[in-house]
Image: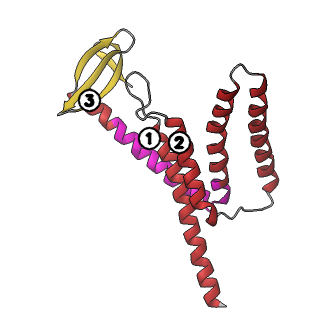
Amino acid sequence: MDNYNFVNKHLVIKAQKVIRFGIVFSITGQAILVLQRLDRTPILPFTSYILMLMQIIIFSTTIPFLRLRIEKRSFNIGVIWFLLFFMFIHSFVSSFWSEYPILIVKISLVIFIPLLILGLLVWADLNPERTFKLVALLLAWLGTFLALIGLFLRFFGSLVWISKEIGFIQKIDIGSFSISQRVSGLLPFLRIS
């Protein structure tokens, strides 16, 4: 009997690690994929489809480890899920009277499928506080890294006028690789973005 509990405990710990990795990878992957070029286009083409595909792959790899918790507060969770599914169905139904029904269906899928998948992963997480702290820590490190790049460009980059729409940028060239950022404001008080 003790051997069964030992194996079961280790399977639960392994399942928790897989679910936590799925949540962390999903959220930090989204934060990285939404980075943009100077003309406000995504760095990778078809970013929204990549995000949705990433969510589906994460969900399909974590399905064997999902164990949804039913507790006393499950009524609140049921209401939240009902509202999410209601919005999902409403967005599909609203495509019937839209001028662009295929576009509305695509946008609905791109918005709600990752939301529902992430909701299931969070619901199955046995320790959401620890996962939240890990996600917050990784996002803080990502923000710090991007801020350091911005400060490096601010102090060591060259100020270049691009166009009236874009304005000034600061850039630094390292061989064929170029890092740049938009700046706004009036000289000498420029703000990086």
Q: What residue did someone put label 2 on?
A: 51
Closer to the camera, 33 or 181? 33
Question: Is 133 colored magenta in this rendering?
Answer: yes
Disc 2 and disc 1: Cα gap in Å? 10 Å
Horizontally, residue 56 falls left or right of residue 171, namely: right
The residue under the point 25% across, 17% down is 160
Quadrant in the picture for the C terminus = top left
Q: Is residue 141 magenta?
A: yes
Question: Which mark identifies residue 32?
Answer: 1
Q: Residues within 10 Å of mark 3 (few under 14, many from 20)?
A: many
Name the residue nearer the viewer: 173 or 131.
173
Camera-near label (1 vs 3) is: 1
**What kind of colouring is applied to the model shown?**
secondary structure
Q: Position of residue 189 (x, y in %)?
A: 32, 16
* Image spot of residue 157 (x, y percent): 22, 26
The quarter of the picture where residue 2 lies is bottom right
Q: Looking at the picture, which amino acid does disc 3 mark?
A: Leu
Which residue, as the protein is rendered here, is positioned at the far top? 164
Give the quadrant of residue 178: top left
The local crowd at label 2, few if under 14, some if 14 to 19, many if 20 or more residues have their Cα within 10 Å, is: many
Q: Earlier in the sequence, mark 2 or mark 1?
A: 1
Q: Is residue 126 visible?
A: no
Q: Which residues are magenta?
A: 121-147
N-terminal of the pair, mark 1 or mark 3, is 1
